[in-house]
Image: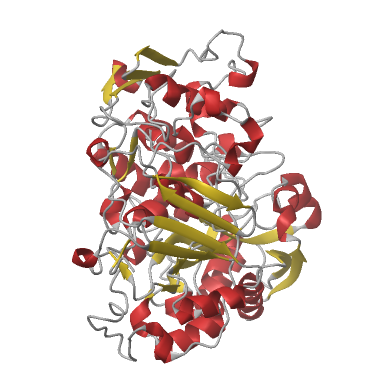
Amino acid sequence: MTTQRTSGRRKQALAAAIGVAALLTTAACGGGDDNGGGSKTGAAGFDAANNKVAQADLAKKGGTLKFGAAQDADSWDTTRGYYGFMWNFSRYYSRQLVTFKTAPGQEGATLTPDLATGLAKVSDGGKTYTYTLRDGATWEDGKPVTSKDVKYGIERVWAQDVLSGGPTYLKDVLDPKGEYKGPYKDTSADKLGLKAIETPDDKTIVFHLPTPNADFEAMVGLTSASPVRQDKDTKSKYGLHPFSSGPYKFQSYSPGKSLTLVRNENWKQSSDPVRKAYPDKITVDIFSNANDLDQRLINGDLDLDINQTGMSPQGRTTALKQHKANLDNPVSGFIRYAVFPQSVKPFDNIHCRKAVILGADHESLQTARGGPLAGGDIGTNMLPPGIPGGEGQKYDPYQLNGANKNGNVAQAKEELKQCGKPNGFSTTIAVRNNKPVEVATAQSLQASLKKIGVNAQIHQYDGSQTAGIIGSPSNVQKKGFGIIIMGWGADFPSVQGFGLPLWDSKYILESGNNNYALIKDKSIDGLFDQYNKTLDDAGKTQIATQINHKVMDGGYYLPFVFEKFINWRSSRLANVYTTDGYSGQYDFVNLGLKSAS
């Protein structure tokens, strides 16, 4: 996922750090106390919706669910959207063959049938996936959703010259040679010329993969696999008014200002096992000033922040003191870390890399990122705990949360001797200038490394130019960026959805590179290949753990934190819970209100 879900390739989704600073008043909360307790009329309590359902039995049909935002979506077009909150929100107006379960925590990262009657029937050694569409699914004008609509929606992923920005997993897996040119250049009469997908009738869709991929069904569950009806496709303008296959449809949208969804009267509950469609209306108010958003949340004018990137220091400090019962503290699914490009000496030597890992003060790094609540638990490895195969802090090969929590100068200096730099060395830390928390992290790392004789200069660069600065291996080598500070989250919850662009040698790119360490490890590449051919969950989980261990054995990364947020939920909300399917965000699709008023 993008920094919002942070994308497997582009990391856009959580990319906007929302500064939310405001004076918070206790009376506005509808309840809450210093101990995090709630009341029947007030908030549910601190962490009441973190990996569990808060006030599930209080959801009523009706009312207006009110989102606020400090940033609009990158696009509301199901093909182009890459922000994590967009993927979450888009399920109000779009459906997929399969989607994430509407369940809290880890269960929410498992797939369940949506438009399809069941999960895929897999055959041909994992190369053929067959789905049957359920009865009664319709577009907002009442016409049925067909297998051809699903195929056409997926084909739009190939039209990157017109619809750039979204994930391209389906294109890469179904057509790795790039033979299909997309529906807008399709010479077939029906514009459905992609050979990898068959639609023998309106209820059946069959995918043919050239080679197996164990996560293919997760890719089919992405928003980019939503149906699009060909006669309603306005191409690059589609994001201004997508045509709905879900329980809500666009009533109005003013980019950068507001969005209003109303009920799709042709949606049938009997056709949709996923969505409860509690509210009558859903609104999004987009603010240019994040302080205004925060104040509106606290005043009770809005129910939650659609961006789901956490409150800022001032806001969260006051909220934790006075409104704790309105707050949840989920693990975000992101890891924040430093990475060591092997093209920059002396980081081509594993012992120099380990010296930095062991010399860093991990508690200080955690504090720089906001402490245990707003920053997260000390990171001990590179696979988020919500992903199958992730072990959380139980796997701590360098004792970063144990004996070496505050750095181990003696061990670090021993590693320096082994890498031929007994007196230390000089290097440069590259960090985005529009991320104050990252700059603070760089300063913390700089200070602790001085104790082992490593003198690190800090180079701040324009965060909007990431792809061409740290994403260019030649530029990294030229500038001598020995340490790069970054963060990453999964596009879908698997080791492939998280780690493939980071660790597989095939993903080293000349521009837009995310394998910053330039890892070329045949054993890691081989494990990814093995993973793709493994269809049982237990086997996939075991391989994911092995990949993470191999990455940590190489000393390519210094993990800072398993990132956490402080998120606000209004006292009006019911049936509210965080889900690993959307990186610890609240699951939007079945939020309800305790009162229809």
Q: On screen, 40 above or below 584? A: below
Of residue 327 and residue 41, the one placed in the foreground of this image is: 41
Q: Nearer the viewer, residue 470 or 428?
A: 470
Quarter of image, res 117: top left
> Whole-percent x and y of residue 55?
23, 69
The residue positioned 63% from the left and 20% from the top of the image is 184
Above or below, 293 against 125 in this view is: below
Judge by depth and name the residue closer to the eye, 567 or 297. 297
Q: Is residue 537 left or right of residue 416?
A: left
Q: In the current view of this chain or complex, which residue is farthest to the left?
A: 57
Q: Nearer the viewer, residue 520 or 327?
A: 327
As drawn, 382 above or below 75: below
Residue at 51 percent across and 48 percent down: it is 251
Residue 495 found in image quarter = top left
Whether residue 444 appears in this view of the structure is yes
Which residue is found at the position 50% from the left and 46% from the top?
A: 250
Give the position of the C terminus as an image quadrant.
bottom left
Q: Is residue 476 above or below residue 434?
A: above
Q: Position of residue 191 (x, y in %)?
A: 55, 14
The spot of residue 140 in percent (x, y) is 42, 35
In the picture, measured across the screen, residue 522 lies left or right of residue 423, that is: left
Q: Which residue of the protein is positioned furthest toward the right in this rendering? A: 478
Rendered location of residue 433, percent (x, y)? 72, 67
Q: How is the image coloured?
A: secondary structure
